[in-house]
Amino acid sequence: MFADQVRIFVAGGSGGDGSTSFRHEAHVPRGGPDGGDGGSGGSVVLVVDAGMTTLGDLRQHRHHRAKPGGRGAGRKAHGKNAGNVTLLVPPGTVVRTSSDGDTAPSADGETIIGELLTPGERLVVARGGRGGRGNVHFVSSTHQAPRHAQKGEPGESRWVELELKLIADIGLVGAPNAGKSTLLAALTAATPEVGDYPFTTISPNLGVIEFDDERRAVIADLPGLIEGANEGRGLGHAFLRHAERTRVLVAVVDGAAGDPVVEWQAVAHELGEHDSALLQRPMPMVVTKQDVPEVHARWPALRKALRAAGPQPIAVSAHAGTGLPELRDALRLALEEAELHAAAEPVSETVRLHRFDPLDAGWQVIAEADGLRVRGRRIETTASRTDFANEESRDRFQRILERLGIDAELRRLGARSGTMVRIGSVELEWGDEE
């Protein structure tokens, strides 16, 4: 699995249970209820760290659970709220829901939860449950000594998929072993791994290039692209995701390749197959390894061939420094061109789609092979917060079922003594009392 995509399980902590308590004081012979509320469970929160460039750290630990809230106590003592679990992610992280952690989710089953772009930005991916209310909240004019208290609400839990789409001003693109990492090291203070074999770079390397006018830009050395990358071959999908997030692409052509023109045309084809708009971005072209005598000798013919297929190429040698000043000027001009294009584009408003789910407020009873199931967010939440070991709490829940009409629907669908009724994670055995 490539280091910029990972699936993790996140779970918020359950809320603490409310307390059933009564005042016990010598001078107060019939003390009233004083049960405190439970504390809130902790949430799992993603936070952008500007210094991170991969999601590799999260691969080592795939399960993240926040702690539950503390229980309420007498004298209206509130349970302790649990702290959040904070996970650091790099800028450009897209967060989606995922069906599970071991199989790839279907495209139809994915939902984008959010996108994290700026340093310090936060996104809650698993919210902690609310604490249950103590019995002090259930006093009424007709019921002065309630023994009912709420249980804490369960925290959210789910698998999520994190995908990094690198954010950089300039991206170096080319075939494996074209010299991108060496060029990055020559232009910036970055120290990427460099080797004379394909796929030395398996995750993006970042550096900062300084221009003469004191302007700075982030430049990325992206993994090498091979034929079929848009279909997922090699490191293709990961590479192309990063290329989407750069304003300027630099076409890096391996001057020592058997046929540099054909090799670059294959790279350009894969870019266009993934997204034709990538080829419309400012794209200076460089031909590397000019310090090699054979490459230097073939440069005039290669320059003529490449000019017919694209922009004016620049001959460079990262080791000797040949062509680097000219390349810096070309990068600065390309960034200015990208900024002009961005300023000229109409600003589109972000459209947020809100999907209405009738079960958020309503309910539904469906028959299962071995019982009946009640669906609906509110009733499921109420069931999860009910202490069915407490007779008063059970009676209160029954009254809610009757008031909402769920009781009548269960009976209509055949609920009788011994029928299993499921509401969320709660399983109840139906019993008709005389």
Image (cartoon, grey):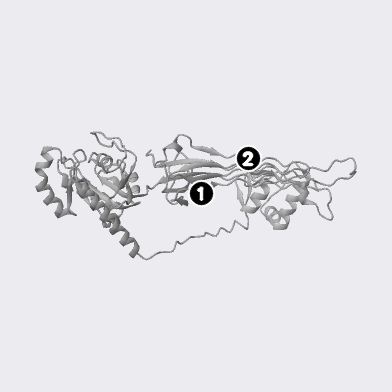
Contact flag, marks 1 and 2 (Cβ < 8 Å)? no
Tell me: 390 left or right of 286: right
Query: Closer to us: mark 1 or mark 2?
Result: 1
Which quarter of the rendering shows the N terminus?
top left
Q: Callout 2 environment at 10 Å: few (<14), some (14 to 19), or many (20+)?
A: many
**Would you say residue 432 is visible in this rendering?**
no
Place of residue 173 in the rendered image (x, y in percent of width and height, measured from the top left): 27, 46
**Would you say residue 173 is visible in this rendering?**
yes
Place of residue 264 in the rendered image (x, y in percent of width and height, measured from the top left): 20, 47
Amino acid found under the numbered disc labelled 1: Leu
Q: Callout 1 environment at 10 Å: few (<14), some (14 to 19), or many (20+)?
A: some
Distance between mark 1 and mark 2 Cα atoms: 20 Å
> In the rendering, which numbered label is found on residue 68?
2
- Mark 1 secondary-structure assignment: strand
Tell me: 42 left or right of 314: right
> Of marks 1 and 2, which one's residue comes earlier in the chain?
2
Place of residue 344 in the rendered image (x, y in percent of width and height, measured from the top left): 33, 65
Place of residue 337 in the rendered image (x, y in percent of width and height, measured from the top left): 28, 59
Tell me: 231 left or right of 32: left
Amino acid found under the numbered disc labelled 2: Pro
Tell me the quarter of the picture where residue 35 sits: top right
- Mark 2 secondary-structure assignment: loop
Name the residue nearer the viewer: 305 or 211: 211
Q: Please name the residue shown 64% across and 50% down the image.
A: 380
Return the residue at label 1.
Answer: 123
Q: Please name the residue shown 25% across and 39% down the image.
A: 182
